[in-house]
Image: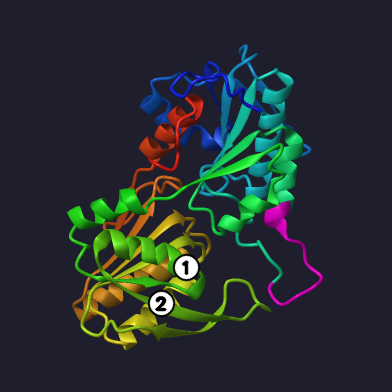
Amino acid sequence: MISPSIPVGSPIAPLCLVTCEAGRAFATRVAAELDTPLIPTDETWFSCGEGKLVIEANIRGCDTYVFQSCAGATDDRSTYERFVMLLHAVEAARQADAMFVTAVLPYYPSARQDKRKGRTREGISAGLFARMLTVAGANRVLSVEIHNAAIGGMFDSSRTTLETLYLDKHMSPWFAQHGIADCVVVAPDVGGLERARRYAEQLHANLAALSKERDYSQPNVVSRSTLLGDIQGRNVLLVDDIIDTGGSVVAAIEELKRRGARDITVACTHAVMSGPAWERMTSVWRRSVDEGWRFRLVGTSIVHHRAPPEWYAEFSVEPLVAAAIRRINSRGSVTGI
């Protein structure tokens, strides 16, 4: 635990930044914001599929932040392989006698597996991953717009805490600057109402929601979407946290257009865009061109896409993550960022 004798504003320990290879691009940009160099590391993958990470500098007594990106096509490693490499890196920092170890995991893998969805014989992987991070030696996990804030309760708070950053205060002015303020904010499902409400308050906009009915016998399948609210003749900002294959978003757009929406902007924190996602979004964009309305997709730099189409925009979260690290290191409040 941090000694209460350390005053707010004073560093709890020297700041050190460490990264796994998949998280290097993001970590490098955060390090530039902090004006702090990355500690050199050597990540190795053996032919049998095992891996390890070696920290190649002294971090004894440091407040150490270990970066990893578990989504995005930066290499051919799976989400699970990247997560295990993060565990290696966290343990390496603990074995190197870092004073505090924070896993910087903007996209928390398996966050959607946070409860049993009508079944009794399945695991709750969000909790499993929380326990693994604790056992590896993480004092803290820093994430962005985690799918369910209740995941914080899956950590043993006496050993590991979850810090979650929210983007509404930062993305809402960006939306206003890009002409997306005069709209109805729509939640893609009832579970996302709180997130959409925050954006609606920031933008002084009306709020609506879609109610999704999923077919849980198949992955990424939405059987039906219905609308709660009025969007007739209005521009829409559809706010989600994760776009994976894009099936839910396409179903939502179909319902919104059927209910009379005009231009549609889809905004998400984690634009994973796996499998058929780009093809599906491109089809929506082509439809918008043919029918004379505007479609835009806004993601963040948590999952960076090289050479995206012109209708895709990226919001940079590195300044926010850097500010959070600076606040944590000086015992300041992350909530006020």
Residue 193, x across and y down, in percent: 44, 70
Quarter residue 332 falls in: top left
Which quarter shows the C terminus? top left
Taking the spot 79% from the left edge, 38% from the top edge, the residue there is 48
Q: Is residue 287 visible?
A: yes
Asked whether disc 2 touches disc 1, contact meaning CB atoms under 8 Å apart, the reply is yes
Indicate the amino acid at tag 1.
Answer: Gly
**Which mark is on residue 192?**
1
Instruction: Tell which of 191 and 84 is nearer to you.
Output: 191
Q: In the image, which residues are magenta?
A: 117-127
Classed neighbour count for the residue bearing mark 1: other residues with Cα under 10 Å, few (<14), some (14–19), many (≥20): some
Per the image, label 1 sits on a secondary structure element best described as helix
Question: Residue at the right extreme?
Answer: 121
Per the image, label 2 sits on a secondary structure element best described as strand
Instruction: Tell which of 20 and 173 is nearer to you.
Output: 173
Q: Is residue 220 left or right of residue 80?
A: left
Taking the spot 64% from the left edge, 56% from the top edge, the residue there is 110
Q: Is residue 50 visible?
A: no
Q: Is residue 316 left or right of residue 157?
A: left
Residue 80, x across and y down, in percent: 68, 48
Give the mark, 2 or 1, whose residue is nearer the N terminus: 1
Taking the spot 40% from the left edge, 33% from the top edge, the residue there is 323
> Disc 2 versus disc 1: distance between alpha carbons?
8 Å
Q: Which residue is mark 2?
A: 209
Would you say residue 331 sits in the magenta stretch?
Answer: no
Indicate the amino acid at tag 2.
Answer: Ala
